Image (cartoon, rainbow, N blue to C red):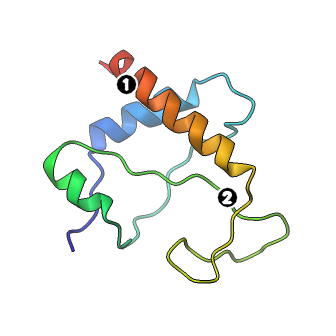
Amino acid sequence: MYPLYNDPELTRKLADFLKNVKDKDIKEVKEFPEMPPSEDFAYYAEKIPSCFFYIACTPKGVEKPYFNHNPKFDIDEDALLVAAKTVGYVVCGYYELD
């Protein structure tokens, strides 16, 4: 397994881009501390500049959520729309980032 590495320049551009998207469902874009995720996306990031990001999806009322590879993982299904919109904005806006 390769370590997951976000390209710093691409990550900054995507974060800035998403912070300026005018969409009521995208409420916040923030950086998290480095983590050692085991994620297959690392194989892509090894080949091309990449940016892996999470969508907040903790169910309402849950204080300490489980990560997505845990069998107790649960999701606030309202986050699915936010995830789809965010990925759509990134894909459609990618060429505006240059």
Residue found at the far right of this picture? 61
Image quadrant for the C terminus? top left
Total numbered labels placed on residues in the image: 2
> Which three-letter amino acid code belongs to the residue tagged 2?
Cys
Q: Residue at x 36, y 41 (%)?
A: 11
Alpha carbon of mark 2 to alpha carbon of mark 1: how far?
24 Å
Look at the numbered disc 2 and give the secondary structure of its residue.
loop
Image quadrant for the N terminus? bottom left
Look at the numbered disc 1 and give the secondary structure of its residue.
helix
Point out the tag, 2 or 1, that comes first from the N-terminus: 2
Q: Residue at x 38, y 31 (%)?
A: 13
Q: Residue at x 33, y 18 (%)?
A: 95
Place of residue 56 in the rendered image (x, y in percent of width and height, measured from the top left):
64, 55
Q: Would you call the spot at circle 1 few (<14 residues within 10 Å), some (14-19), or many (20 or more)?
A: some
Closer to the camera, 80 or 32?
Answer: 80
Q: Which residue is mark 2?
A: 57
Tag of residue 72: none
Write down the quadrant of residue 50 in the picture: top left
Q: Residue at x 43, y 21 (%)?
A: 93
Write down the quadrant of residue 48 in the picture: top left
> Which three-letter amino acid code belongs to the residue tagged 1?
Tyr
Place of residue 15 in the rendered image (x, y in percent of width and height, measured from the top left):
47, 36
Tag of residue 94: 1
Place of residue 89 in the rendered image (x, y in percent of width and height, measured from the top left):
51, 28
Instruction: Determine whether 36 is above or below 40 in the image.
Output: below
